[in-house]
């Protein structure tokens, strides 16, 4: 009878080893020797994986064996005596190999708690990996977003990249590495450690920059790092300069532009800042304006005598004046660009929550059985729109319908995040509305609400409220501030309300966040 033992089964067999004895008719002869299959390997806890020229010890601890023979595929391994109880094999050929053991027992042998006969064949699956080897490629990204020509990947290549344009880097690896790390001197992002085989990098600052890429694995331990000096040379541009985002930095308001700005062109009088908090206007006077000493594409606005807080709504406007890039392109005016605070997202940093919808399917966001009308919706993971990354959740709530979803593992367990009582947190979400439907002025606006369990606050506010003036066709950030009554792990159930809307509301949802917040006193 033939059996295949994979690593977990090997371990179970080892742990479940019991001596089964029976008395013969003459009690003076004592107990007979049991026959029981017990096989183990030195790498059984690590899926029997080794690198080429690595070794595994195979052990047969089965009592009652009359004879045994280990068999290895021809040409794959150097092996000690194949009839020994323990054999050590050094593998010299990459691939998935079946190592077999033929055993003959004195009596019918137990496998677990079942008798399986006197002769047993067992197969142990071994994976032999090549050493980790990496190779990277790069292509320009054309202004229209299509993939352009390949770059020369070599030291001192100085591939010319126009400031504010992007390059797509990709990798090919051998040896099944598990961890990947890009260090991208001068690029945005400057580092990247995701498993994505492609990463798009924007270069905003003129200069010549290096690049390195590392791929590693823990077991069997190994890795490969490649680096290139002076790979990218960023040159001046005539492209328009874009204001990419407004964030906070060390208490200042940071305007992040698509490339380096000329400090001599800054004039504080060209900028205006408005702050509101709970519909109250907070006086704000622009004090100094300067270039960030670390990142030349960031303009820092410092306010005179005013501190900004997470629950402030802060908008920045610029009236066209002298502001220009280092390569001489003038900035156009912009009005009411909202500041989005930089925050430590608990869902990203210390939870398995798929906050950006990049690594889950619709099945991981199931309906949680609240009954009608909370089942009147549809949800899919889409690549049509993304606030960040490549995916988001696309949701349609039916006319007079609603939604209630959780986030679960494939086995149905809630995915949780940890919080502390007594602290204030900001729950944030980005939405991109494609249709608001036809809100009924006599009823309630559609909204989203983030309820948490256990110990939810049923009075938590809409986040967002989809009023008739809600922006359509753009990504919009919404947040609400909450306190959790107990410390511990929480899970979200996200409720969508559309009961007073006689038409479908449709939107994308991305980049959920939970972060500690500092509120205006």
Image (spheres, helix red, strand yellow):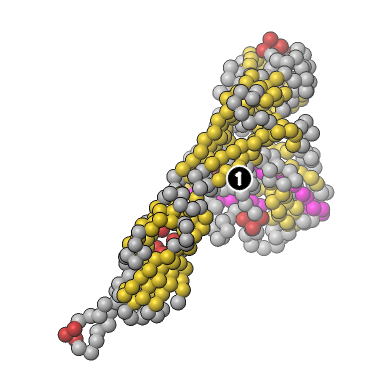
Is 205 left or right of 413, judged from the image as shown?
Answer: right
Residue furthest left in the image? 28
Residue at the (70%, 25%) spot, across then down: 161
- In the picture, measured across the screen, residue 204 lies left or right of residue 222, that is right
Query: Which residue of the protein is positioned furthest toward the bottom in this rendering?
Result: 25
Question: Compared with residue 338, is residue 508 higher up or lower down, i.e. above or below?
Answer: below
Quarter-wise, where is residue 40 in the image? bottom left
Q: Position of residue 402 (x, y in %)?
A: 72, 55
Quick check: 221 above or below 307? Answer: below
Q: Residue at x 64, y 39 (%)?
A: 170
Could you say which quadrant of the image residue 202 lies in? top right
Is 432 magenta? The answer is no
Residue identified by numbered label 1:
355
Q: Residues in magenta?
A: 489-513
Residue for point 47% across, 62% down: 73
Q: Is residue 492 magenta?
A: yes
Q: Nearer the viewer, residue 391 or 62?
A: 62
**Image point 39% across, 66% down: which residue?**
70
8 over 221 or under it: above or below: below
Residue 373 x %, y %: 72, 60
**Magenta-drawn stretch, dominant element (helix, strand or loop):** strand
Q: Is residue 279 visible?
A: no
Q: Residues within 10 Å of mark 1 (few under 14, many from 20)?
A: many
Quadrant in which the C terminus is drawn:
top right
Instruction: Identify the image quadrant of the N terminus.
Output: bottom left
The image shows residue 372 at horizontal and vertical percentages of: 70, 62
Q: Nearer the viewer, residue 12 or 138?
A: 138
The relative height of residue 494 versus residue 336 in the rendered view (above or below) is below
- Give how far across and how far down residue 471 sits, in percent: 78, 38
Q: Is residue 197 left or right of residue 33?
A: right
């Amino acid at each position: 009878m033939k059996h295949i033992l994979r690593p977990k089964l090997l371990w179970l067999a080892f742990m479940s080893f019991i001596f089964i004895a029976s008395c013969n008719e003459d009690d003076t002869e004592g107990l007979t020797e049991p026959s029981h299959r017990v096989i183990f390997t030195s790498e059984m806890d690590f899926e029997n994986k080794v690198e080429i020229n690595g070794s595994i010890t195979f052990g047969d601890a089965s009592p009652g064996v009359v004879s045994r023979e280990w068999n290895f595929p021809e040409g794959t391994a150097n092996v000690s005596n194949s009839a020994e109880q323990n054999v050590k094999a050094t593998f010299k050929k990459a691939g998935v190999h079946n190592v077999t053991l033929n055993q003959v027992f004195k009596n019918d042998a137990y496998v677990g708690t079942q008798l399986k006969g006197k002769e047993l064949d067992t197969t142990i699956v071994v994976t032999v990996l090549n050493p980790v080897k990496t190779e990277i490629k790069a292509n320009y990204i054309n202004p229209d977003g299509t993939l352009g020509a390949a770059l020369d990947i070599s030291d001192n290549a100085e591939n010319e990249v126009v400031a504010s344009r992007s390059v797509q880097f990709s990798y090919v690896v051998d040896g099944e590495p598990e961890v990947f790390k890009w260090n991208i001197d001068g690029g945005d992002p400057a580092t990247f450690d995701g498993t994505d085989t492609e990463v798009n990098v924007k270069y905003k600052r003129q200069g010549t920059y290096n690049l390195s890429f590392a791929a590693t694995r823990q077991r069997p331990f190994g890795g490969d790092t490649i680096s290139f000096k002076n790979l990218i040379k960023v040159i001046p541009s005539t492209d328009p300069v874009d204001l990419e985002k407004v964030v906070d930095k060390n208490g200042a308001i940071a305007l992040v532009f698509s490339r380096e700005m000329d400090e001599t062109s800054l004039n504080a009088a060209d900028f205006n800042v408005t702050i509101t908090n709970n519909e109250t206007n907070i006086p704000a006077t622009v004090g100094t304006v300067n270039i960030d000493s670390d990142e030349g594409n960031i303009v820092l606005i410092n306010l005179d005598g005013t501190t900004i807080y997470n629950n402030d709504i802060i908008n920045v406007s610029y009236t066209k004046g002298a502001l220009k890039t280092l390569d001489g392109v003038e900035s156009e005016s912009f009005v009411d660009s909202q500041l989005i605070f930089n925050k430590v997202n608990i869902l990203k940093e210390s939870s398995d929550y798929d906050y950006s919808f990049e690594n889950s399917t619709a099945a991981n966001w199931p309906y949680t059985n609240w009954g009608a009308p909370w089942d009147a919706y549809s949800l899919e993971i889409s690549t049509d729109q993304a606030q960040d990354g490549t995916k988001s959740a696309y949701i349609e709530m039916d006319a007079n319908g609603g939604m209630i979803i959780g986030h679960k593992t494939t086995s149905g367990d809630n995915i949780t995040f940890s919080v502390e009582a007594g602290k204030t947190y900001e729950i944030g979400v980005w939405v991109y509305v494609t249709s608001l439907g036809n809100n009924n002025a006599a009823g309630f606006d559609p909204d989203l609400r983030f309820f948490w369990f256990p110990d939810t606050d049923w009075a938590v506010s809409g986040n967002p409220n989809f009023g008739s003036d809600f922006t359509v066709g753009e990504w919009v950030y919404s947040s609400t501030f909450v306190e959790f009554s107990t410390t511990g792990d929480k899970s979200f159930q996200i409720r969508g309300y559309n009961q007073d809307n006689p038409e479908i509301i449709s939107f994308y949802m991305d980049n959920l966040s939970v972060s500690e917040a500092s509120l205006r006193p």
